[in-house]
Amino acid sequence: MISFSSADLNHWMALFFYPFVRIMAWLSIDPLLGNRAAPNSIRLGLALVLTIAIAPTLPSPPAVPVASGQGILILVQQILIGLALGFALRIVFAALSTAGQFIGMQMGLSMASLYDPVNGAQTPVLGQLLIVTSTLILFAANGHHQVIAALWNSFHEVPIGAVPASGRGFLGLVDWAGVIFSTGLHIALPVAAALLAANLALGMMTRAAPQLNIFSVGFPITLGTGLLALYFAIVYLPAYIERFWRDAIQAGLMSVRSMFGP
């Protein structure tokens, strides 16, 4: 007759429960696989599938009861690691939304916004266009595979255990969040330069012909110029987004390593 002790049950529960908590915390904030537009049951099922696939390849967790004080500390640690990984990836989409806002302000579309299910808020229409385009680019470039591989690496770089947190990891996340504005401006710069040239040309036209109604003529010109510049600039977006996505994954792993690493 096969018998199981309470120690065996605690070991099996810890073997699957702690990885599930880390993966679920990551999915709750990840913008690619944990999209808020997806039902909660889909995200829960994805977390279960990833846990079953990843847990057998992980080092043995510490023999600590899940319901103990040390078990609660380990649980909080897994939640923080998952949130840190997802937050680092969310910066990519925040930078794209910022780029869309910069372009929309120059084109006169700052008031045009749509509901973004990824961020759960109103997003400029051009920002939504960049987010959807970048999502398709990342899936085509196997960005979701890179995220799953990084999640698996996080369990080996920061094994499951009650390790005190360090403030260096949080500072690393704050520094990484600063790229929202620099990267967003970098993405929007070609279109913004073209719109600046168009506005200068309109200013000279208005100076030469004061009777010209600039409001009826200027908006179609700036809108058409912005869309044309965006059409030519978006060709260079895939390589940039793929590199930016890899940098986000590395930033998340480095912050987790600094936060709970040895």
Image (tube, rainbow, N blue to C red):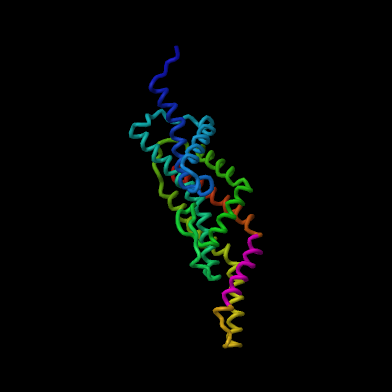
Q: Nearest the camera: 17 or 232?
A: 232
Q: Is residue 226 above or below residue 258?
A: below
Is 51 a magenta residue? no
Q: Nearest the camera: 256 or 149?
A: 149
Quarter of the image for residue 185 reads: bottom right
Q: Residue drawn 59% across and 55% down?
A: 133
Q: Nearest the camera: 103 or 257?
A: 103
Report the side of 111 relative to 193 (left or right): left
What kind of secondary structure does the magenta stretch mostly adopt?
helix
Residue 52 in the image: state x and y as whole percent.
51, 32
Image quadrant for the N terminus? top left
Report the side of 227 relative to 50 (left or right): right
Residue 30 in the image: state x and y as whole percent.
49, 47
Q: Is residue 238 above or below residue 143?
A: below
Residue 117 in the image: state x and y as whole percent.
48, 52
| Residue lying farthest to the top in this orientation | 1
| Residue lying farthest to the front in this orientation | 216
Query: What span is colored magenta in the figure?
Result: 218-234
Q: Is residue 17 visible?
A: yes
Residue 151 in the image: state x and y as whole percent.
52, 41
Q: Residue drawn 37% across and 34% down?
A: 71
Q: Residue drawn 43% across and 50% down?
A: 170
